């Protein structure tokens, strides 16, 4: 039986750490972490939160393993709606990252905080 994207996301979220933008900003500073925007470069260029790193979802695992090889690094992932961030967090957990968080706010809310 096929599942809808919202169903897949809801299922994935059960096994992921989630956090609001305000909580993520504080925790990121405390743990010397990184905030990754997994949207496409054109989207990121149009509107982005301060202090975020753009690594598109399609390149995430490869770039992360090259640039951030610390499996305990605090990683906070966001996108425009949360869907790509959820899938991205799931993948990072699969490759071995242990401190991954999905920022659950919409892009406009994230831009206001960071």
Image (spheres, helix red, strand yellow):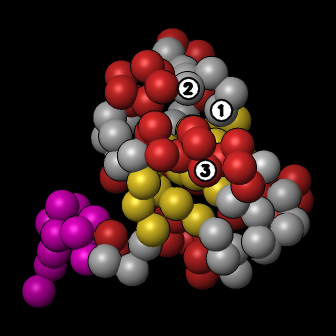
Judged from this view, the residue extending furthest toward the top is 46
Q: Which residue is mark 2?
A: 114
User: For mark 3, does the 10 Å Cα neighbourhood hold few (<14), some (14 to 19), or many (20 or more) residues?
Assistant: some
Report the Cα–Cα distance between label 3 and label 1: 14 Å
The image quarter containing residue 114 is: top right
Q: Which residues are magenta?
A: 1-11
Q: Earlier in the sequence, mark 2 or mark 1?
A: 1
Q: Residue at x 17, y 69 (%)?
A: 7
Quadrant location of the N terminus in the rendered image: bottom left
Q: Residue at x 59, y 65 (%)?
A: 100
Q: Nearer the viewer, mark 3 or mark 1?
A: 3
Residue 98 percent across, percent down from the top left: 66, 76
- Cβ atoms at labels 2 and 1 below 8 Å apart: yes
Q: Is 30 placed left or right of 36 in the picture?
A: right
Q: Which mark is residue 27?
A: 3
Q: Main secondary structure of the magenta part?
A: helix
């Amino acid at each position: 039986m096929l599942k809808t994207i919202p169903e897949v996301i809801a299922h994935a979220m059960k096994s992921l750490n989630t956090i609001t933008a305000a909580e993520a900003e504080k925790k990121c500073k405390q743990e010397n972490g990184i905030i990754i925007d997994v949207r496409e470069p054109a989207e990121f260029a149009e509107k982005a939160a301060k202090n975020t790193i753009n690594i598109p979802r399609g390149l995430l695992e490869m770039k992360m393993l090259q640039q951030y090889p610390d499996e305990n690094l605090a990683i906070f992932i966001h996108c425009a709606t949360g869907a790509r961030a959820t899938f991205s967090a799931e993948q990072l957990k699969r490759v071995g990252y242990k401190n991954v968080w999905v920022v659950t706010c919409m892009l406009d809310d994230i831009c206001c905080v960071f």
